[in-house]
Image (cartoon, rainbow, N blue to C red):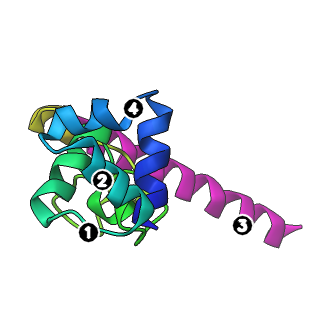
Amino acid sequence: MFPNRLRTLRNDRSWTQADLASKINVSPKTIGAWERGTREPPIETITKLSDIFDVSADYLLGKTTQKNTISTTETDDILTMYKIDTRGLTEDEIDDMREELEEYNDFMTKRLQEKIAKKKRK
């Protein structure tokens, strides 16, 4: 999976193997070997590649089809539930977003409960 993902991500940016090689300080032949699956990069390089391509290491390694991970402090957080990407936001902005989503969720839950109650009355 890694060889295909690497090749696809590189081609999506119209980069040659030499272009990518220069960004991570390896030879173009090394990139070619990774893309053929005859060699594997060290973990430090996988981390660099995930940063360069703005994808998760799990995506690069084929463990998930989701390109990006979601940054949250709680696994059951509402931001995770709505798959909100919080990278680049301040803690205050994240808290504001969480509050807005919780209010929206409460509104939608109440609305659904009212519809169910209305149907039961009929």
Q: Which mark is residue 70?
A: 2
- Most extreme residue toward the front is 29
Is 107 included in the stretch rendered in magenta?
yes
Q: In this rendering, does residue 104 appear at all?
A: no
Eye-nearest disc, 2 or 4:
4
Q: Residue 91: x and y, percent?
A: 10, 38
The magenta segment is 96-122
- Helix, strand or loop under label 3: helix
Residue drawn at x 31%, y 55% is 69
Which structural element holds mark 1? Answer: loop
The residue carrying mark 4 is 16
Report the front residue among 66 and 25: 25
Mark 3 = which residue?
A: 117
Q: Which of the two discs, 2 and 3, sits closer to the camera?
A: 2
Residue drawn at x 40%, y 64% is: 2
Mark 2 → mark 3, Cα distance in angstroms = 36 Å
Q: Under tag 4, what secondary structure?
A: loop
